[in-house]
Image (spheres, coloured by chain):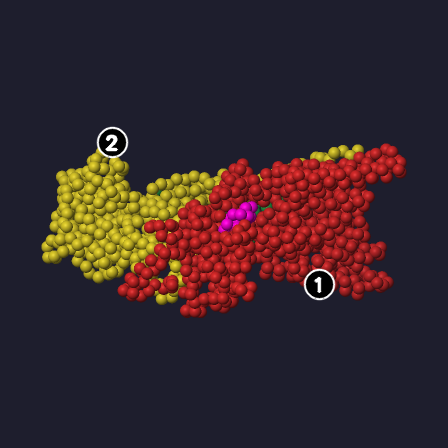
Chain colours: A green, B red, C yellow
Amino acid sequence: MDSSLLEIWQTAPGSPFLPTVGKGSQFLVGFVLLLLGLSLTGAFALNRSLVTLPVLGIPASLAIAYGTVYMFCAVGVYV
Amino acid sequence: MAVATTASSGPVDLLINVGKNQSTKTLLRVIILCFIAGAAIASRLFSVIRFESIIHEFDPWFNFRATKYLVANGFYDFWDWFDDRTWHPLGRVTGGTLYPGLMVTSGVIYHLLRALTVPVDIRNICVLLAPACSGLTAFATYLLTNEMTTSSSAGLLAAAFMGIAPGYISRSVAGSYDNEAIAIFLLVFTFYLWIKALKLGSVLWGALCALFYGYMVASWGGYAFITCLVPLHAFVLICMGRFSMRLYVSYTTWYALGTLASMQIPFVGFLPVRTSEHMPALGIFGFLQLVAFLEYVRSAIPSRQFQTFLYVALGGIFGLSLLGLVGLTAGGYIAPWSGRFYSLWDTGYAKIHIPIIASVSEHQPTAWPAFFFDLNMLIWLFPAGVYLCFQKLEDEHVFIIVYALFGSYFAGVMVRLMLTLTPVVCVAAAIAVSQLLDTYLVARSPEVPDTEEEASDGHAKKASKQGGLRASSQPVVGIYNVVGKGFIAGAMVLYLLIFVQHCTWVTSNAYSSPSVVLASRMPDGSQHIIDDYREAYQWLRQNTREDAKIMSWWDYGYQIGGMADRPTLVDNNTWNNTHIATVGKAMASREEVSYPIMRQHEVDYVLVVFGGLLGYSGDDINKFLWMVRIAEGIWPDEVKERDYFTPRGEYRVDSEASETMKNSLMYKMSYYNYGSLFPPGQAQDRVRGARLPEQGPVLNTLEEAYTSENWIIRIYKVKDLDNVGRDHASAASFEKGHKKKKASKKRGPRVLRVD
Amino acid sequence: MLNITLYDSVIACLSLLSSVAADANAAEPSSSESASPSTFKPPQVFKNANLVHVISLEKNFAKEAINVLIENVSTEPQDEYFLPFTSSQMERVGGFEVKDRKDPDVVGFVAEAVEVDPSSNLQYYRIRLPKPLAPNGQQTLGISFYYLEAFTPLPAAIEQSEKQYLVYSFSAYCPSSYPTIKQKTEVKLPSSDIPDYTIIAASGDEKEFPVKQGSKLTYGPFPEVPAGAVSPAKVRYEFTKPVTHVSQLERDIEVSHWGGNIAFEERYTLYNQGANLSAQFNRVKWAQSQYFNPQTYALKEMKFPLKVGSKDAYFTDAIGNVSTSRFRSNKREAVLELKPRYPVFGGWKYPFTIGWNADSRRFLKKKSDDTYLLNVPLLEGPKQAEGVGYEHVQVRVLLPEGAENVKFYTTAPESSITEHNVHLERTYLDTIGRTVLTIKARNLVDDLRDRELIVSYDYSTVAILRKPFVIFASMMAVFTSMWAISKVDVKFSTK
């Protein structure tokens, strides 16, 4: 228990926390990113080489990573 | 999607073009299959969207309960599970009397998802397992069909058919967490592996086939279908003179490994060598050895006479072993065919000898409209596909023919076996449709490379347009004619669209009701949910003792176990006919007879389902005759079906009902106190459309404990023995006289009308 | 029936009062193990110059308020005032708060239960005054607290449509460790239907106590009584409303920075502690009584006024969704109305779960770069006219994965908080687990439902990016192994 928190809350600047991607657009963002990620994965699956690994793999992984997080949020499992 | 990918420019397009043409096709096919799987899953989600993520019907509740037990206690405890909360006071060796495949699959998925940091609730896994498996089934059907034909579109068509055919959806909507959910996938996939093994004569594929056969055995009692169909296929091939080393290798590998695998399941155990259902597989195994031996001898000694002699010997040995089999069966070493099996040959058998099987609606013979209802246009494409198989008649086509014959027969005998017919119908119909489309759209003129690819996508419409363009520069005769092409393609597209529409309609209207929750419409059109089952089960779960025994008809046993979490006397695992008959007798007899039975079985509450107020026809009064029949099977002197009918042979519940009927516990429990809901003499049973007698039934040994909002579930408490040793009837009449005196002094009588 | 006893026998009387069968011997030190002073007796340094004891029985828990003018009678300044309870009362008392009646600006009263001999039937709450009271100094304390499970229905079993009567036992003299010069006890009841109450001989103008005015009973004023004096009294009154008691409430508050969401879930184990049914439940009567007589002691509906902006509400129980709920959410209010599957009569139980989502901007503030402040209600139970009592409450605040330096403060009475800790728990997409602050409280009532819970925590950018990074790394591993496997020829050579 820290009784100073009440005062801190009351005096804290009124900047409510907002997420980077709002609730309304999470599904769209998640879906587009996942689609992009899966397409890149498909492209990589067609042509697996040491060159395509960073060229396609890294963007695909990034898109899937953020897409998954936002898709989870969009379906109601707020991570 | 497929078009978009190919049409899009940029690095993706570049890379696809860099890749070989073959892999682009593969990618397209993968994408199409993904869409088919998506459609298959989506069309099974009606009930989740309309109601909620809930386990449906009856058997799935047991599977769900068992899965929860598995997840909570681990595999070994599950294997050794003795359940003392069912079949009181006998209990059930659950771990040894179930097919664990379904539960173990869910358990594995559950733990896998947890490991992937997605801890999904076990209920949701169970609810969505069947749709997920249907996606896999579509894929397996694709593989199986591809073995049958060279046309690349047939497989995709078959996958699409399989994905949305109502015959399969009926058993695999979300929430229908039953063995069939995964078994159909395993069935189709095992068949695919069998064909693959047979074609290649490969030990590897044969072993894989045995592996999946083992999985199938672990999942569903219907594995006997594979156990009979594969040997039959082998036998037919031999009879056609198509014995080959491929057949020998694949069959012996499958049989040896598959039988060993199936014997690992406690419930199956030594059945594969001890029951008649499994004998064909063993017999063909022996027969194949003989044939192989003779083939070897024949190749070594090419003498025509010797050959004839050998064939005679072969016949002799075959006859001898058949005789031996009969002898062993007669001697009791091999169990004869079970009643369930007999009922497959004689549809009237069950009704006479095993009423408990006949009392289940899904064991009834199929009505012919059901075929059209469940398969729509596939049912008339099916014979065409089988005919096309005769045209080629490779080993694998023989399989489809044999499967088609037997599947059709069994589907005609029992409604639920429509399920095993559906895969072969989809395969055959897809062969027919693709043959038709290929014939009309892929004309055998020289410049067709691009249309071939289009047709493979199943985009019949698009292909027809391109065909039209090409046809204008060519002599227009017969199937090259743009009109003919357009007509056929258009008709086919129309049929396919109607098929999709029909499937969606059937799924939405017939197969997506959880039956635990009933939906009705309010006058203003909004949906009203009738949730009486869960209301009553929740009441039982929260407000009765943890070990209060509930007596009900066996239909509700699994639901009471799953939702109310209370011990039951009988449930849907109908392993003990006598116990069920005991409950039937208690329900069908007078109170004086029923009460000792209930005391002996330590029954605390009795649950009946009554639809009279709401017009819900699946209630216990309508099932009552089955209770009587089953009880009569054990106690023919005490319970007689005839007594429950009026002298004119009618089954009635109104004032004309027979005395035995009116005095039966079931009748009393259903209508007890029901009349007080109506003005005097107006009580109406809306299911049977009968006006009830003015005088309601009197219950002495039971008291009403709970009645759900719409009266669907009524729960009665069994009274304890009387404190001063009177029987309940005299105690009740004493009470009544006592009360009446007091009541006359006080304000007025109680609402409860007892007289 | 005037019954003045001296301090030494106070234990016996208090135990009688709480209907716990314990006699005076029980208070004797039964074993010598306990080093703590089992015969602990608060130093007689105060006297209660004037005391008004108000017992409100309008809801289904008892709310007691003691307004007392205390005077330091010792020669030293004193700052510890003791209030006695029996051990049975001690288990049921909650929401203990102290204020200065005269001067609301005086803050800093600390009230806590004193750990005396646990086997003793007499326990104390110690009130530490913000400033020691000088000799002969006076201060007016407003002490208020609640008793849960305070009533017994009489008769214990009634018909479905009968009226329910409850009995409450108390003392006409306010239990005190100090002599009281002047006092009176007021009992406020929900209705004027009070068939039985204890009548005691009066002093002064009145002939006998209590004086009944409508739904209020007044005992006193009494002249001076010594410390520890009690006068057992009972009142039996009509209360045809459900005696809703939540034996266990688990409340989860899940904060998501990625989704900008606060998810609430509450799991209730609810009982009706009213009179049981004397006969079995009768559906016909119930359906009929629904038409013309809505007053019943069965719980058939609950209203949860949630914070404005709540959405996606759900109501489930052990076997799935309960379809009899209504959720209204608009700009002014968000009300969740629930009907249990069955009417919950006395002695019946109904456990259920509710949950809803809300936008983080309503509850979460960013204080500085990495520090966030969360302000949520500690309790958001149903708002019922008849009240709700909570025996055990467990509030868990699931902060994002990687949050650290967790501090919290709640405006609820500190003495109600029994335990709190911070640990990790793994759920969706978690690799190390979310930081969970668990606060356990007991004996809360729905009067405290607006009390705030403020949590501050640090959450760095690195920690925020943990989730996508983990997925990114695993996807890269998959791609690399795909590439590696394509380089390996696993086929048997066919040549």
Q: Chain of mark 2?
A: C
Where is residue C38 shown, x and y percent of the image?
22, 35
Where is residue C140 shown, x and y percent of the image?
19, 49
Residue shown at the point (67%, 53%) measured from the top left: B346
- Residue type pointed to by label 2: Ser
Image-based side of A73 in relation to B362, left or right: left
Q: Residues within 10 Å of mark 1 (few under 14, many from 20)?
A: few
Residue highlighted by disc 2: C31
Is disc 2 placed on a helix, strand or loop? loop
Part of the protein shown in magenta: B570-583
**Which quarter of the image is occupied by the C terminus of chain C?**
top right
User: What label does residue B494 carry, if any?
Assistant: 1
Residue shown at the point (27%, 43%) measured from the top left: C88
> Residue B290 in magenta?
no
Where is residue C267 shown, x and y percent of the image?
42, 49
Where is residue B566 shown, x and y percent of the image?
46, 48
- Residue type pointed to by label 1: Leu
